[in-house]
Amino acid sequence: MNKEKSLYFWVFCLLICFVPKVILCQNIKVNSSPAPFSIFNMPFTLGLGVEQSLSMRQSLELGGEVYFLPSFGEDVGGGEYGYRIKVAYRRYFGNNGKYRGFYVAPHLTYLKVDLPNGGEFIVPWESFRQAIGLQISLGYQWVLYERISLGASFGHTTYRSYYFSIENGSKLNERWRNDFDFNLYLSLGVLIFKE
């Protein structure tokens, strides 16, 4: 058992020593969609993300965020709060360097939210929404002093949503629906390593 632990330790040390600097070049950032507009299906979000450089013009981003869409009338899509997890591929344009410039980013998204007032359902029941979504974003990102990233983007997400309620441990009112939202993002990040 001690030999096995020792082997894991040396493998870990080798990985630390020989992983190229370009792989370790990550952009850790705070993302926010600060202005919710329920009439446009634009939620408030606040989260953390890590952007990993793949090449000079490509990167992958993984993020998680809290999600709140304020109530608007009697629509079941209003008054939602929960969390969202996203994986995005970014393609930058121009010769500005890593993490810089205009980009297009398709996202794969998982959303889980509570409907605290029951939405269309009877109030005593707990109601929920789970969804898988595809998002396309257009944005621009700056890097200041080789360390600080600032970004802004706008995106549209289309969801396939599963709605259900729970009463006494049993699911009720199950149904599927297509939904969407818009996202206006601002981000502030720090590059772990300079290029």
Image (cartoon, rainbow, N blue to C red):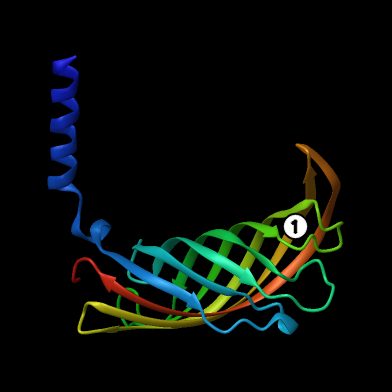
Circle 1 sits on which residue? Answer: 160
Element type at mark 1 = strand
Q: Nearer the viewer, residue 46 or 140?
A: 46
Residue found at x 40% / y 67%: 58
For the point 21% across and 79% down, the residue is 146
- Residue 165 location in percent, x, y? 79, 49
Pinpoint residue 122: horizontal percent, then vertical percent.
87, 56
Q: Is 75 displayed left or right of 11 in the figure?
A: right
Q: Is residue 121 above or below residue 67?
A: above
For residue 87, side relative to residue 176 (left or right): left
- Classify 10 Å Cα crowding around label 1: few (below 14), some (14-19), many (20 and above): some
* Residue 65, percent from left and from top: 50, 64
Q: Nearer the viewer, residue 49 or 24?
A: 49
- Residue 173 visible from this viewpoint: yes
Residue 102 against residue 19 in the figure, above or below: below
Q: How many marks?
A: 1
**Quadrant position of the C terminus in the picture:** bottom left
Give the residue type that dot 1 points to.
Arg
The residue sitting at 62% across, 81% down in the picture is 36
Q: Quadrant of residue 15?
A: top left
Query: Can residue 101 be seen at all in this image of the molecule?
Result: no
Residue depicted at 78% across the width and 38% down the height: 168
Q: Which residue is farthest top? A: 1
